Image (tube, coloured by chain):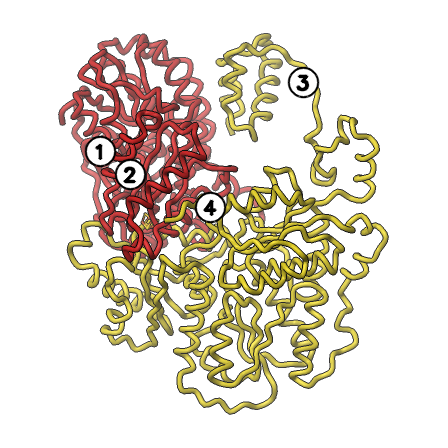
Amino acid sequence: MDGCVAPIMPAVAAPAIIRERGQREVFCGLTGIVWLHRRIQDAFFLVVGSRTCAHLIQSAAGVMIFAEPRFATAIIEERDLAGRADLDDELDRVVGQLLARRPEIKLLFLVGSCPSEVIKFDLSRAAARLDSRANGAVRILAYSGSGIETTFTEGEDACLTALVPSLVASDQAQLVVVGALADAVEDQFQRLFAAIGLDRVAFLPARRASAMPPIGRGTKFILAQPFLAATARALQERGAERIDAPFPLGIEGSTLWFEAAAAAFGIAPAIVAHAIAGPAKRGRDAVAKIAAELAGKSVFFFPDSQLEIPLARFLARECGMHLTEVGTPFLHRDLMARELSLLPPATQLAEGQDVERQLDRCEAARPDLVVCGLGLANPLEAMGLATKWSIELVFTPTQGFEQAADLANLFARPLARRARVKV
Amino acid sequence: MQLTLWTYEGPPHVGAMRIATAMRGVHYVLHAPQGDTYADLLFTMIERRDRRPPVTYTTFQARDLGADTATLFKNAVREAYDRFRPEAMIVGASCTAELIQDDPGGLAESLGLPIPVIALELPAYQRKENWGAAETLYRLVRAATLGAKPQRGAFSVNILGPTALGFRHRDDLAEITALIRALGISINVIAPWNARFADLQRLPLAHANIVLYPEIAGTAAAYLARTFGQKTISTVPIGLNATREFIAELTTLADVACPDDIEADQRSSWYTRSVDSTYLTGKRAFIFGDASHAIALARVAAEEMGFTVVGLGTYSREFGRELREAAAQYGVTPLISDDYLEIEAAIGAAVPEIVLGTQMERHIAKRLGIPCAVISAPMHVQDFPARRAPVMGFEGSNVLFDTLTHPLMMGLEEHLIGMFREDFEFHADAAPSHLGGDVAVRPETLVSGWDQAAEAELKKIPFFVRGKARRNTESFAAEHGVSLITIETLYDAKAHFAR
Ligand code: SF4
């Protein structure tokens, strides 16, 4: 556990864990492109894959059809597989076509998929070749968002991990906040850090390719998202130090998160308390109004984004909800240690998935609210269960004090709707 | 390798899912990685189905590749059988599993399940969704009817083609079923919609097959014609004239008379002839969709609306010949492509006044500021309306009249805009008034009490709630006697109104 600043609290009563390795009902890492391409505004994501991959992204993006999006798929065809076309030549041609069309692109990600992995198409090598040929006009990197290797939010982890080696080296002291955040959240955090007295604060990923932070031994970083295990390791390998903290969801999570960041730079808790007092109080009051509707209700999480544990912690501790089962696709114990210690004793966790069995459990438990993926939501609603789509929890600005009530509201709305609608 | 921004069709296994989901008692075991489970949401979210598609995905991972994906597949088949007890099963590979060559068919067969197990070979790197649906239906029909020796009784027909996730399939089917019954003709089997495998076994008993959706049912109908000497009715009854021809074809074959009141509820011909439809004359229409819908809509546009067809295209390459013939009829260059950018360019170049297309063209049209109606898959959730809205049969022709006129300006409104071009509400860029024409210029907000940072912060709020956020903040500020709105006020108001 190198890089930990705050001590790990021992769990009071270790949560019980169901481990499953059955059939999964989750997106693959390609899905991350849907928000990453909005975040990094001069980046383009080119998936090298099949029609399935193209269809997945456009289906996950749903109504978000942009005139000309900053993502696309180079669809592998029969002649590529049969060896009638040289894969490298084909990719060069497609990339050339793309860059000619979009000269404003400064950062191009070649994104690997299951088909490109299975045929062992080395995209890292291809990216290196294309990058050196581009002569600095555009940076070209590669990562895998394939479903055989990455689950949903792990796509962002893979993307940021790929970004790390390209970051400039610098040993200057700074705080880096890691994980894609909504612009408004980033600005709020920036202001609060300034009020705390931290001026050198950078964000990874930045909004533009040219604004990515330098990294080195002076860097202390804090994760804003829980699914960034590989990114954290890559940053540590470059000499940066991880600040251990719960995640900034809810008032409590946000408070502990800011406190941990400040403590890492030797700033006294009183200064933090003073800086966050206004927003924290405002947020707490706003959450309280909504928590009244959630208190005493039970919630069941299907594994999806790895946000499940921090969300469950927020719902249990700040909204008074009862946790029936908290599923997560993976449990990174070190990153999650603080979160786990905050969960109510003996919370039922589930790592991995066997979707049919989990549905059986969910049906038997009949929770008041189920947090699940889009494929499962309507079938569960039809069974009389209220649901919240987990993907919305990834797309919506939910971090920090000002968003805590919005976060609570995402869970309250399905229940409020049921209470209101008479059909 | 093909650079693709948006795809009109999914991979072929999604076509197979559309068949399995439409049917009853059929389960599909798909050898595929976890991400491919996204396809469930097409059915549960876009089509709003209340059940999961009957599909089991093996969701193999990288670590399984070195080990034993074949055993994983066999276990998935066995468990799916035990859990769902289907009457028939289809098995196959997605794009990734096709590369690892596990032979799903052979593996499933080796389990000796007591039900028919049909293996699908859907080449994912060559074919697409509609082809996959057609092939799956054909394979199921063939498996169900192999060696059948039908004894035919009174004249009856099968209706082939309606699937899950089809453009208005549910409503078309209801309309056409009622129409056929009104003609006194009996329906033997409808497939795949709500059909069981045992129903497919009865297919050869009918005298003719109605191919409602050639992209999906063409292959199966050709097989049935070849094998059992059944007739094929391939007129797609979209539009008034096509519906009349469809009836003529059917009544001749069945040797029945058409009842006099068959068109009792048909209003589209009168609406077209009524005086205020004059303004529809010569409207330039660009039509794009699957081949059957595009070709049918071109005819409706030209013959039944009096539009001028200025563009006609399809993404269904398998039906290129039919589309080329139709395009020649209207004197336009056929556009056979699934390249979104090429289609966008063609629409821009044709300068249409209305676009009839898929959800992709809706976006193109929106960007170009051209009215648009969706007339073909792929479509979005709003194109699965709660009400019955067929595009086939006589009610379908009524629906199409509405669908094709609603996005346009009404006759008089158009004239007024012509008269008062510079009017601030009635200008050329205004949307039709019945579509909420409030793109007109509004006076700037009267409240000036926003400091710069707060104003900038407000801009970060998504545009569709920004107006509400501004109003709330201002009323909050007024209530609390705040004269200058700062970021703090903005968030105080946000917290105040949280709910
Ligand atoms: S799971 Fe694999 S094949 Fe499927 S969409 Fe994701 S990357 Fe593509």
Q: Name the residue under label 3.
A: B444
Image mark 1: chain: A
Whether pointer 2 and pointer 1 mark residues with C-beta atoms closer than 8 Å, the reply is: yes
Say which quadrant the N terminus of chain A sits in: top left
C-alpha separation, residue under disc 4 versus residue under disc 2 = 24 Å
Residue bearing the label numbered 1 = A230
The colour assigned to chain B within the rendered structure: yellow
Residue B465 appears left or right of B263: left
**Mark 4 is on which residue type?**
Trp
For disc 2, the marked residue is A154
Marks 1 and 3, how far apart at CA: 49 Å
Tell me which numbered mark, 4 or 3, is placed earlier along the sequence.
4
Depth check: A163 or A287 in front?
A163
Answer yes or no: disc 1 within 8 Å of ligand 1: no
Say which of A373 and B430 sits in front: B430
Residue situated in front as seen by the camera: A271 or B263: B263
Compared to residue A47, the image places residue B402 above or below, namely below
What subunit carries mark 3? B
| Three-letter residue code for mark 1 | Ala
- Number of other residues with Cα within 10 Å of mark 3, as a class: few under 14, some 14 to 19, many 20 or more: few
Residue B40 rendering spot, x and y as whole percentages: 41, 54
Please give the residue where the numbered disc 4 appears in the rendered image. B6
Distance from label 1 to label 4 (Cα)?
Answer: 31 Å
Residue A212 showing in the rendered view: yes
